[in-house]
Amino acid sequence: MSLIITVYVPEGIVLAGDSRLTLNWMDKTQSGEHHSSITTSDSYTKIFSLANKFGLGVFGEVYVNEVNICGSINQFVEQNINENTIIDEIPERLILFFGEKFNYPATHFYLVGYKIEDGISIPHTYSINLAEKNYTRSNFENEQIINGANWGGEIEVLSRILLTVKMQRGDEWAEVANNAIPWNFMTLQDAVDFGVYAVKTTIDTMRFQQKEKTVGGPIDVLVIQPHQAPIFIQKKELCIV
């Protein structure tokens, strides 16, 4: 599993994610099936700059039929993206390329970038679901551009902190409303900080919980602004340790 988050604010878009790769399988025992899980890597790449124009984050099932889906992203770019490609053409191409190649696994993408509309750079953020063969534009609502964030993968920790939850008070459960985040007033630096906070808080919280540590490793952070190539402001590099 993973935690991938995209934050879209007036100044730009931030895409952040962890680096842990977890291998899951089922063992058959006399008492039935038993789920097993191990961490196989903390250097897995889940955040990509596509053709120096767009950003892509991947989470969910990424190792299918003993093949690494992310290893095919460069091939996808070579075959499907050029200098004339616009962002709203890409979701269907992702579904067609990866879906047919890997038989539509439980893999999700976040695609982010800008499109020139009437001479103005307009932000586009998409959530793409391979298994269901569909996608949605997440930053467009009621015919208007909106600011906000989407996170996918291992979402429990962040959702408990930021969304409305219920707490037991005596014999009853009462809603504890969330405190709204003023996305419209966030600077790009705020968005970067929030992306890192979201992933790091999940990693730190899971460290102490009695559960599988499915989010971990270095945090990669990609920033996209109008009229500029995507910039990795934090990215793990190959090295000798």
Image: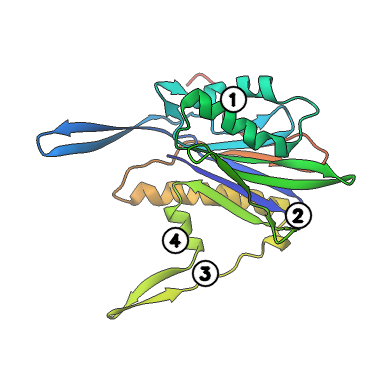
Mark 3 crowd level (few <14, some 14–19, many ≥20, 10 Å Cα):
few
Mark 4 crowd level (few <14, some 14–19, many ≥20, 10 Å Cα):
few
* 161 or 67, nearer to the observer: 67
Q: Which residue is mark 4?
A: 160
Disc nearer the start of the sequence (2/4): 2
Work out how far the residue at label 2 is from the one at label 1, CA to CA, in angstroms: 29 Å
Disc 2 to disc 3: CB gap under 8 Å: no
Q: Amino acid at mark 1?
A: Ile
Of circles 3 and 1, the one toward us is 1
Of circles 4 and 1, the one toward us is 1
Of circles 2 and 1, the one toward us is 1
**Residue 84 bears which disc, if any?**
none
65 over 219 or under it: above or below = above
Name the residue: 50% across, 41% down: 132
Name the residue: 62% across, 21% down: 74
**Residue 73 bears which disc, if any?**
1
Disc nearer the start of the sequence (2/1): 2
Q: Which residue is mark 3?
A: 178
Q: Amino acid at mark 4?
A: Arg
Residue 169 place in picture, x, y as percent: 33, 79
* 154 or 40, nearer to the observer: 154
Residue 101 place in picture, x, y as percent: 51, 23
Disc 2 to disc 1: CB gap under 8 Å: no
Q: Which residue is mark 2?
A: 10
* 89 or 224, nearer to the observer: 89
Name the residue: 73% across, 29% down: 52
Residue 128 visible? The answer is no
* Quarter of the image with the N terminus in it: top left
Q: Amino acid at mark 3?
A: Asn
